Amino acid sequence: MATAAPNTGLPLLYNGLEPLSSNQHAKAHVRRLDRAPHVAQTHAIPVTVDEFSLIQRTFPIVFSAGENPVPLALMGLNEGVNTFLDEDGKLIEPNAYLPAYLRRYPFMLARLRPDSDDLSLCFDPTSGAVGEFEEGEALFDGDQPSESTKAILQFCEQFETAGQRTGAFMTELQKSGLLMEGEVAIQPEGAEQPFVYRGFQMVDEEKFRELRGDELRKMNQNGMLALIYAHLFSLAQIREIFARQVAQGKGPVPAREPAAAEA
């Protein structure tokens, strides 16, 4: 279900990174894209803990498999299926909440040199959002960043800070021993066998219920408790996403052997 991104050395969705520079991009504008075809083929989007309360209302929140899990919002249950975007990458529901990871694209803060901790504002040059267009907002006012660029930089800085908080949460969650391999079985009416989804991690509710009072108190004080509950509550949305897939004709096809569809 929630597999890792290909090991390209670049973050999910990014095909390249180019530093934003007043020398090279003095005449560049940024325009809003009303569709994102590459996102239409992406079913799991990274999210930050700052978004859990909003995300859990619409998307299931799970954790990626592997030694260094990250929180993911599921926009579909099967590889290549996104139930919130059409085939052209246009939002089916314009008012649906979009994770900050998507709203940040094509920009991000990145280290240009491995021996430096300095972060530079970069963008994906293949996105089609940045270029010397007539439309859009200017990125520079002379040799200085425009107000639009300052707003983009501020958003990316906020995302970076939220990412650090998310990393701290994941470290504590792993230390707690509450994470387990996830499995969800959905049996639609009339189906002979359930569809079984794996490939992700989730909080073990049984272990969670057995936590000592002092452990729960600590989680409550550091904010982990609310985040864990948001995750657990969000899992009810898995069936809603499955129903969306079926309604859109993107549901999994029953297999003969094995009977369950594993994503």
Image (cartoon, rainbow, N blue to C red):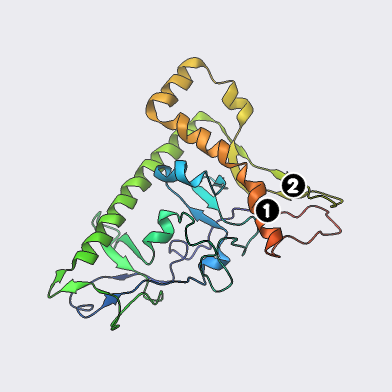
Residue drawn at point x = 18 percent, y = 77 percent: 23
Residue drawn at point x = 41 percent, y = 72 percent: 33
* Residue 163, position as x, y percentages in the image: 37, 47
* Residue 76, position as x, y percentages in the image: 61, 57
Kind of residue at badge 1: Phe
* Residue 105, position as x, y percentages in the image: 39, 64
Kind of residue at badge 2: Ile
Residue drawn at point x = 50 percent, y = 56 percent: 45
- Badge 2 element: strand
Query: What is the number of the mark on residue 81?
Result: none
**Badge 2: residue crowd in 10 Å (few <14, some 14–19, many ≥20):** some
Q: Which residue is mark 2?
A: 186
* Residue 107, position as x, y percentages in the image: 34, 65
| Mark 1 in CB contact with mark 2 (< 8 angstroms) | yes
Q: Which residue is mark 1?
A: 242
Between disc 1 and disc 2, whose residue precedes? 2
